[in-house]
Image (spheres, rainbow, N blue to C red):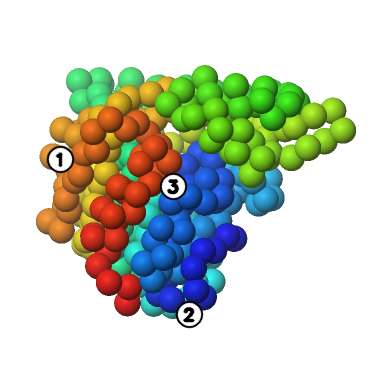
């Protein structure tokens, strides 16, 4: 786990996105720590300094997140989740609402249509195909290693997915999310993981949980779409907001709101959370 701020300060838990790391909050988290919060995050299984696992699923990630909350303490805490971390936080808030006092979601609400005009038997066939594809991918890469390269090469590859992030930030990301072996740098990410999926899972399973949330909820979206994002639109979220929910749309930023606009995001989230308590 990674922490920022005074250990005696009230905690807020951050959950990073897929193919990211706790230390991607290294610019953003200190801004909240400076406002009196103890910020706690962790590398998800298969990412960064966490162990690679034989199981990757929503349920496994929920167990890991609950273990982090148990480490922080028994009282309910605010939680901030980005991308996959936002989706996991939503599932956790739905499953254990007594553990989360308030929830901030940074472009972490998958919203692909549930295809209501598709016959039920066709839905079943599609889900079976998705699960089979996921298992085939797991088998095909189980004995492979990630391709090595220089810091600049890994940064360039990541930049294809995140063209809005600066070269300086991408090189920094390699150094906190990679390791240097004898033949070059590799990402500290299990090769069996793939974009867009962390186990048998469908996007609408997440967004349909939003209306029932019973705690204060803030959904934040940028106006710019990019490859490594859900493509969720404000209208997709607005019709699902719970009674204590609200949404903020930030102009001119993409999926990585907290990296592109850390100060604006810190102001927004600090205002939503209120004084540390």
Return the disc, 1 or 3, that comes first in the chain's sequence: 3
The image shows residue 39 at horizontal and vertical percentages of 46, 64
Up-down relation of residue 73 to residue 135 (above or below): below
Q: Are marks 2 and 1 in contact (CB under 8 Å)?
A: no
Q: Which mark is residue 85?
A: 3
Front tag of 2 and 3? 2
Element under disc 1: helix
Quadrant for the N terminus, please. Answer: bottom right
The image shows residue 238 at horizontal and vertical percentages of 15, 40
Q: Residues within 10 Å of mark 2 (few under 14, many from 20)?
A: few
Residue 43 in view: yes
Element under disc 2: loop
The image shows residue 104 at horizontal and vertical percentages of 31, 53
Q: Which mark is residue 238?
A: 1
Quadrant for the C terminus, please. Answer: bottom left
Q: Are marks 2 and 3 in contact (CB under 8 Å)?
A: no
Q: Which mark is residue 143?
A: none
> What is the distance, in whole Å, between disc 1 and disc 3 at their CAs?
20 Å
Up-down relation of residue 222 to residue 125 (above or below): below
Up-down relation of residue 110 to residue 116 (above or below): below
């Amino acid at each position: 786990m990674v922490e920022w701020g005074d250990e005696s300060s009230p905690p807020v838990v951050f959950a990073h996105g897929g193919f990211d790391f706790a230390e991607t909050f290294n610019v953003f988290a200190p801004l909240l720590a400076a406002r009196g919060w103890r910020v706690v995050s962790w590398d998800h299984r298969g990412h960064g300094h966490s162990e690679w696992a034989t199981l990757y699923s929503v349920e496994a990630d929920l167990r890991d997140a609950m273990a982090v909350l148990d480490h922080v303490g028994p009282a309910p805490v605010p939680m901030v989740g980005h991308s996959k971390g936002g989706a996991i936080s939503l599932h956790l808030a739905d499953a254990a609402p007594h553990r989360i006092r308030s929830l901030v979601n940074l472009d972490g609400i998958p919203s692909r249509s549930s295809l209501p005009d598709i016959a039920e038997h066709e839905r079943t066939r599609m889900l079976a195909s998705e699960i089979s594809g996921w298992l085939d991918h797991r088998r095909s890469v189980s004995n492979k290693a990630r391709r090595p390269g220089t810091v600049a090469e890994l940064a360039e590859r990541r930049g294809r997915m995140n063209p809005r992030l600066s070269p300086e930030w991408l090189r920094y990301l390699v150094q906190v999310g990679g390791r240097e072996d004898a033949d070059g740098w590799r990402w500290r990410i299990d090769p069996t993981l793939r974009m867009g999926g962390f186990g048998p899972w469908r996007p609408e399973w997440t967004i349909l949980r939003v209306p029932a949330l019973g705690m204060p909820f803030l959904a934040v979206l940028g106006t710019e779409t990019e490859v490594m994002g859900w493509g969720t639109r404000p209208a997709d979220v607005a019709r699902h907001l719970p009674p204590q929910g609200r949404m903020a749309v930030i102009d001119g930023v993409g999926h990585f709101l907290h990296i592109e606009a850390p100060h604006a995001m810190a102001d927004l989230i600090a205002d939503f959370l209120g004084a540390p308590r």
